[in-house]
Image: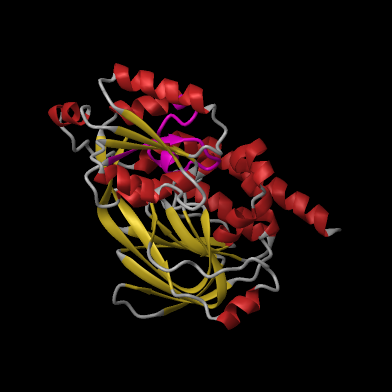
Amino acid sequence: MTWDSWLAIAALLVALSALTIALGARRALAAVSGRRPEPISEEAAVDDLRSQPVVVIYNPVKNIDVPVFTRMVEDMAADAGYVDVRFVETTIEHPGDDQARQAAADGAGLVIAAGGDGTVRAVAAGLAGSSVALGIVALGTGNLLARNLDLPINSSEEMVRTALTGGTHSMDLGFLEADPLTEAEIEQIRSDDEVAVSVPEGEHAFAVIAGLGFDAAMVGDADDELKSKLGWFAYIASAVKNMATTKIRATVTTGVAQEVPIDARSIMFANVGRLPGGVVLAPDAKLDDGWIDLVVIDTKGGLVGWADLVRRMGLAGMGVTHDALPETGRIDLKKTRAASVVTREPERVQVDGDVLGYATTIRARVEPGGLLVRF
């Protein structure tokens, strides 16, 4: 059997498994989400905010009619009692973080991020630690944070309404940083990736999930054209492509605990746990519990292991933690406030679906209540 045939079979297995899981997991999503935090803003405070500017930071590359979108936001903001709405574009050099910081410094009462996961993450990073709430109009492929907040992602109008009139909640925010690679390490990986770069210095915020290994490779190799046509299903093809990659050999340290050697497909840090398709990665992850969930994923037995992994993720989403079938795919979870990972070889690193580059040493931490968000 040819490699292409194996890929087709693998894609079918993964897709069928994911769809089967989604049907069951969707019935349990309310339980998975756990309690929803109470809004922290009183009605009087909300009224005061309406006299302050609303700044909409939007990605002009996304598939939106900008004049129609801006008119809709202005009309809905006026109906909600806001008197000043401003629009700011993102650029490649400034994806939203700088604009958000400037908006907060200029006295904005609300900042709305309109774009994909990258735009939302950048704006969230710019608002981290401030008293300005983030509203979200999700226009991307994964829309990870929007899904975890149960935002009405199929309606831009309803998302705008939620951003303008929803309750303001406090949520945790994760931060990841990496040690720079040596020139020798960069040259080593450029034989496979001609544009390989080290993860930029400094901390990188994430609201949903950060990690290295299979997850970062899957995100990085997803075809942009497929994403525009198929949405998050495009990641299935990329997942199949990376199923046969070598396992990560790493050492993981959490808190003051002893170093633990690990062989795994992915090592991730989850602030919240829900993925597209009804799949739940970390069932106990809560957006306001002051912890991040260390997630270690491994498989064995080829395609059987991957199918078992997807099946177990679906069962976990429905609250089933014990399974009589042999374990060929596994997920290990541990709550922590900080952790570090050192890998033997450089690995791709992603935060909320943005691939930052390669690293061999990463550190992650949680900032409890680091972000205010509307939902």
2 over 38 or under it: above or below? below
Farthest residue to the bottom: give it. Answer: 184
- Horizontally, residue 228 falls left or right of residue 266, namely right
Q: Quadrant of the C terminus?
A: top left
x and y, in percent, of residue 136 in the image: 39, 36
Q: Tell me which corner region of the image, top left, top right, bottom left or bottom right, holds residue 217.
A: bottom right
x and y, in percent, of residue 78 in the image: 31, 19
**Which range of residues does the magenta coloring cover?**
133-156
Residue 326 visible, this orientation:
no
Name the residue nearer the viewer: 239 or 79.
79
Name the residue nearer the viewer: 330 or 192.
192
Q: How is the image coloured?
A: secondary structure
At a point 37% along the width and 46% down the height, the residue shown is 99
In magenta stretch: residue 208: no
Name the residue nearer the viewer: 20 or 212.
212
At a point 65% along the width and 46% down the height, the residue shown is 224
202 over 271 or under it: above or below? below
Residue 342 visible, this orientation:
yes
Name the residue nearer the viewer: 246 or 129.
129
Q: Quadrant of the N terminus?
A: bottom right
x and y, in percent, of residue 339 in the image: 36, 69
In magenta stretch: residue 155: yes
x and y, in percent, of residue 313 in the image: 51, 51
Farthest residue to the right: give it. Answer: 1
